[in-house]
Image (cartoon, grey):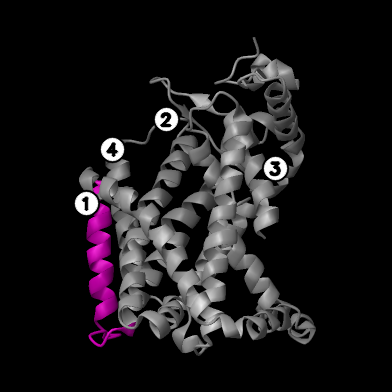
Amino acid sequence: MCIIGAASAFIESTLAQIYKRRNSNGESYGGPAYYIERALHAPVLAGVFCVFLIATYAVGFNLLCSYNLQSTFATYSFYDASVTPAIIGAVLALLTGYCLLGGGKRIVKLTSLIVPVMGISYVLISLIVIFVNIGTIPAMFGQIFSDAFDFKAIFGGVAGSCMIYGIKRGLYSNEAGVGSAPNASASAKVSHPAKQGLVQTLSVYIDTLLLCTATALMCLSTGVERSKAVSGAPYVQNAISTVFGKIGPTFITVAMILFAFTTLLGNLFYVDNALIFLNHKKEPSKRFMRMFHIACVLVVFFGALIKMDVAWAVADITMGGMTLINLPACVALASVAIRALKDYEKQMKVGKKPVFYGKNIGLNEDELDYWKTE
């Protein structure tokens, strides 16, 4: 899924750069809705994509993010299933609301600095746990391949097979092909669209090939219990605690607080872009955005209260809607992104700093906004 996802991530992010637009401040913006509208001439489909994006990132993923955070507290003795989730949900919702309504800039800046450090620390901790349990490595890989290619499970109930779960969770992890990352990619300042496409490809490798694999190998190498009762974050916490004791679960909780907070705000950045598109490329009124953000805060609160199966189901359905629109669009426009890559490689080979002109890949002035063909 990582290898396939990296390819689709390159295509969608390069397309987002090619078809991005310039606002009155000279900054760029765009995403799948813009290349679907401009290159495929399908404004209605672009609008439907935006609706799914809003449902995914304002509701589906934020419900799941809030649930995942509160679940990390289940390992502590003070956790009370009837009270603790509501308290955690309320605190997270208030912090999110505070930042959305204009405050919390220092909080956002601090977390953005700490999160990369936590990510590196997480990989190092995973490697230590795997090294301590190095004797179980052969049996672990045997279990991985046995579960992945359990044809009885696959043909008996495809939707519930290990392989299908791997595909779904791999897609959720890196979001490649879903159509979310291009919204951020379009705002990047680069001299050539292929540059941003390659950066996005690298992010998929880091996220899925490194972080997700580290998680899987760490958990399986410890041999801790795998069951519905400890699914999700508690399973990871139990695995780390076999080597680091009580410090392990605490580290995961702190990391999840930071990751969840930045994820919630990042998700709503994508939503803002979709709302602008649906509002005829204009920013919605402040009153509307205030009401919308209040609704988003309530979603964060309720996410901490719902069951895991419900959170995942909502996220899968809404994300599936985005993917079913964006991936076919990427396939239809893949030749444009590939021509851009070849143009980039051609300039690199002769020692030039790659710059982009639409005419070099067969595009005319009418098809572009930010980039010029002359």
Q: In the visual, does 170 lie left or right of 215?
A: right
Q: Which residue is mark 3?
A: 330
- Work out how far the residue at label 1 is from the one at label 3, CA to CA, in angstroms: 37 Å
The quadrant of the rendering that contains the N terminus is bottom right
Residue 120 visible in this rendered orientation of the protein: yes
**Magenta highlight range:** 75-101
Residue bearing mark 2: 282
Does 213 sit above or below residue 159?
above
Q: Nearer the viewer, mark 1 or mark 2?
A: 1
Inter-mark Cα distance, 4 to 1: 16 Å
Question: In screen coordinates, is 362 left or right of 268?
Answer: right
Q: Examine the structure image and report whether residue 69 is included in the region drawn in magenta.
A: no
Answer left or right for 124 relative to 75. right
Cα distance in 3D space between marks 2 and 3? 26 Å
Dominant SS in magenta: helix
- Bin the neighbour count of mark 3 within 10 Å (Cα to Cα): few under 14, some 14-19, many 20 and up: many
Which residue corresponds to mark 1? Answer: 98
Residue farthest to the top, as pictured: 374
* Element type at mark 1: helix
The first of marks 4 and 3 along the sequence is: 4
Whole-angstrom CA distance, mark 2 to mark 4, is 12 Å
Q: Is residue 54 above or below residue 311?
A: above
**Which residue occupies the foreground of this view, 256 or 126?**
126
Numbered disc 3: secondary structure:
helix
